[in-house]
Image (tube, helix red, strand yellow):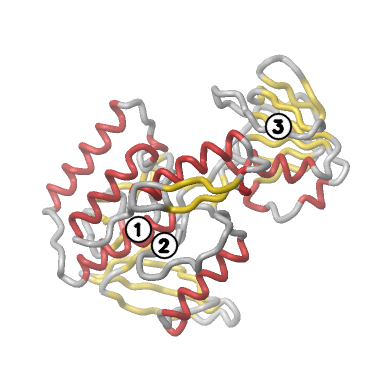
Amino acid sequence: MGFPDFSIPDQEKSYLSQQEILHFLNLYAEHFDLKKYIKFNTMVKDVRPIDQKWQVTSVEKPTGKEHVNIYDSVIICNGHYNEPIIPNIPGQELFTGLIDHSHNYRDPAKFIGQRVLVMGAGPSGLDLTLHISSVAKHVVLSHRVSEPIKTQYPENVEIKPDVKRILDFNKVEFIDGTCCCFDTILFCTGYRYSFPFLHESCDIRIDDNHIQPLYKHMIHIDRPSMCFIGIPFNVCAFQMFDLQARYYCKYLKGEMLLPSTEEMRMHTRKDIENRQSRGYVKRQMHMMGPDQQSYYNELAEEAKTTPIPPVMVKLRDLSVRRLYDDLINFREDQYRIVDDNNFIKIAN
């Protein structure tokens, strides 16, 4: 998951810890002497267009001092794992236990001896079910996915379908008619794209996580001096961030021209129609998955820059399958890249 101009140091294991990823990012910043350009402990409060430029108001968190600066371009890189989606379950107001979201999870200690309902069978739901089961009395993983969950959890974990309603202060009914009592409900139900610092005059619209008007899921069609990095999901994240940044920098430096406003609008409209024809709903308008390699190739070809090799997509897809098939052991897998198209598995 390194970058074309700065690779992760060679090592035996294929899955790195959170601390190791942080160390790599610090190495990257030090190698390119980036920290002198970063304003730490500073929050962007407001971004708005001023003529053909951007006015950015920021706040120093320790002192509360505000700064207003004018920029030629703004690149939004705030991620999309900040505003949790909290479902509204019928009868939810009756529940007297703790209702929380995976966004706030740090460690399993507060679940010791509890009966915990984990809602959502994405990577977070699967992973936290395993973590919490090490200390909880009973964990129920509730989901709505069509395929059975293959991971073999400990005996104190039970798999159930979606929640129908909450009956009283601690009893939950599932759509199969069964009921269980819980001390905590933990939502692992995803996040909303959120840009609270963008003034309404930026004219960015979000409808069920579909952000418009963006060309190639990145560039503001009506104001191309604003760009969003990292909007697509089900992707090779770090490599895509890097490729999107290189693409946009080519435009900023005048080394690549964008199509006309109308052409960008037409391209985006065709992309939306194509996704709709395949059954995608609004919240999937930025989902790549099987389309990611063609997306990467388009960006690289137009910007005449280094592409993301197909082997990375193959590894990413295999890793996701392994996560769902064998959550407990998949991080022990070891792979070695042979060339841009192939890899081999060397241990598991």
Dot 3 crowding, Cα within 10 Å, few <14, some 14–19, many 20+: few
Q: Which residue is mark 1?
A: 228
Q: Do callouts 2 and 3 mark residues in contact (Cβ within 8 Å)?
A: no
Instruction: For mark 1, give the secondary structure.
Output: strand
Q: Which mark is residue 152?
A: 3
Per the image, label 3 sits on a secondary structure element best described as loop
Which residue does the image show at 60% across and 80% down from the upper left?
Answer: 62
Query: On the rendered structure, is 216 left or right of 132?
Result: left
- Tag nearer the camera, 1 or 3: 3
Position of the C terminus, as image quadrant, is: top right
Residue 89 or residue 82, whichever sits in front: 82
Q: Residue furthest top?
A: 177
Of the numbered discs 2 and 3, the one sitting upstream in the chain is: 2
Residue type at mark 2: give it: Cys
Amino acid type at mark 1: Phe
In x, y percent, where is residue 255? 15, 68
Name the quadrant containing residue 180.
Answer: top right
Q: Position of residue 44 (x, y in %)?
A: 46, 70
Disc nearer the start of the sequence (2/1): 2
**Dot 1 crowding, Cα within 10 Å, few <14, some 14–19, many 20+:** many
Q: Tell whether label 1 touches label 2 (CB within 8 Å).
A: yes
Q: CA distance from mark 2 to mark 3?
A: 37 Å
Q: In the rendered view of the protein, which quadrant contains the N terminus?
A: bottom left
**Relative height, residue 44 to residue 213 (above, below):** below
Q: Residues within 10 Å of mark 2 (few under 14, many from 20)?
A: few
User: Does residue 9 appear left or right of residue 92 in this picture?
Assistant: left
